[in-house]
Image (cartoon, grey):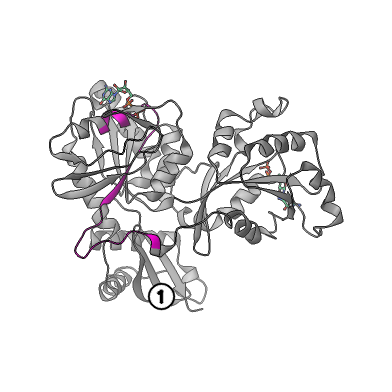
Amino acid sequence: MKPVIALVGRPNVGKSTLFNRLTKSRDAIVSDYAGLTRDRHYGQGRQGKREYIVIDTGGFEPDASQGIFREMAKQTRQAVTEADVVVFVVDARDGLSAQDHEIANYLRRLSKPCLLVANKAEGMQAGAQLSEFYELGLGEVYPVSAAHGQGVRDLVDLALAPLQLPDEEDLPELAEGEVAPIKLALAGRPNAGKSTLINTWLGEERLVAFDLPGTTRDAISVPFERNGQKFELIDTAGLRRKGKVFQAIEKFSVVKTLQAIESANVVLLLIDATEGVTDQDAHIAGYILESGRAVVLAVNKWDALDEYQRELVQRSIETRLGFLKFANLHFISAIKRQGLAPLWASIAQAHKAATCKMSTPVLTRVLLESLQFQTPKKVGAYRPKMRYAHQGGMNPPIIVIHGNSLNLVTDAYKRFLEGRFRKEFNLVGTPLRVEFKTAD
Ligand code: GDP
Ligand code: GDP
């Protein structure tokens, strides 16, 4: 599980600016997907090899005139509770305020790692100028400048330092010839029908579930096999197991959903047909794309709609989830057991595409053929020169193109290349990343 960093602090101290810094590298990856809705509250970041999730609790604050406990909306409290480390941002220029004290009181009671960060500290020293913040009783004060990027790397190192990562060697090894299970996450808003679908699955003869862990906590992970293929249904947010059946629990956790997506190979995103595509669906979808996980879309409760309503839902999918058009789309009824079998084919196909191996010679051939078909535009005196391509990763597949002046390649051309690669390798159901490594 990726560690979760929550940013808290009163309005205007620079939380969103810091959030943008912390999630910047990922932003660039998805900037050219038209229609992608990003949830400004949740993002992912990476520093070196360490990846993390960031929550900006700023946007949740409803009424600043209320006391902190009312002010920190339910979602914020939940986010803070679920975070591994809290970064409390204060304003180095404004100094301490009553609100800062209230937030500090709240955080002290949480007894979880908390870093006190004085933002807007460009040109300031950690010493005298920041001494008043020690009053908050949260220990050391770390000066940063989110706007200028100063101290941000150190901040991430500090925040992640106490969080032990499992060593790669600690990961279970597979025996020779053993195939790793497909890790499947079932994502979707509360009420989309996730527990109904799981229960329908588990009631199927063809699906064999192995020792359901007898957990009463929120965490669920069910290993199962279907037609000889091993799966692991990973910790699905918002569900609880009661005896042999799954039930929705009231507390829906965005953080858990995000972590489930992160740990999955394939995400089945369930959309409630009776609600259409909501903002929250679009945000979850955006997050799946950002994380690079393979995805299958299923619109549930199709039985409950008439022809006209179905038409509307189909249109809302096109307009709101257009950035996932590489994914297979199914219309199902979990209750009436309609349309469920084809889901498995799509899940398997998405997994295959996400983990496919693309050899350098074939990638390079496709690249050169594409160049012949359509040459990239000259910019000024220069024309981007692409020489060869190799695979830089899996799940999602990453194709790295090497050459010169590649910073001049337009987004449109990049999409054209993406389309050619997708077609050649039959990449249905997985995001694809095309990156450029330019020699000059
Ligand atoms: P939030 O309400 O806590 O999310 O704060 P914002 O990120 O929206 O920032 C509030 C204001 O502070 C904006 O005008 C930012 O440009 C400014 N700001 C943010 N970070 C810095 C910084 O490091 N130095 C300075 N001088 N201004 C900053
Ligand atoms: P979860 O919160 O995502 O786990 O959703 P549930 O599985 O608890 O389902 C929420 C509600 O939707 C329940 O009342 C279900 O009976 C209903 N529901 C689930 N699947 C379907 C379906 O395919 N068709 C219809 N009409 N209702 C469904």
Q: Which residue is mark 1?
A: 402
Q: Amino acid at mark 1?
A: His
Q: Is residue 305 left or right of residue 439?
A: left
Q: Out of 392 and 174, give the one closest to the viewer.
A: 174
The answer to whether residue 142 is above or below residue 424 is above
Q: Is residue 281 above or below residue 350?
A: above
Q: Residue at (63%, 61%) from the top-left corner? A: 153
Q: Please report the bounds of the magenta region as a residue range.
A: 170-198
Horizontal side, residue 203 vs residue 291: left or right: left
Front residue of 58/264: it is 264
Q: Is residue 205 above or below residue 347?
A: above
Query: Residue 309: x percent and y percent?
Result: 30, 24
Mark 1 secondary-structure assignment: strand
Look at 77% across and 42% down and name the residue there: 136
User: Around disc 1, counting alpha carbons within 10 Å, would you say few (fewer than 14), some (14 to 19), or many (20 or more)?
Assistant: some
Foreground pick, 321 / 256: 256
Q: Is residue 406 visible?
A: yes
The tally of labels here is 1
Q: Which residue sits at x=35%, y=54%? A: 431
Tell me if residue 378 can be seen.
Answer: no
Residue 22 at x, y percent in the picture? 58, 54
Picture quadrant where residue 315 is located: top left
- x, y percentage for residue 397? 34, 61
Q: Is residue 188 magenta?
A: yes
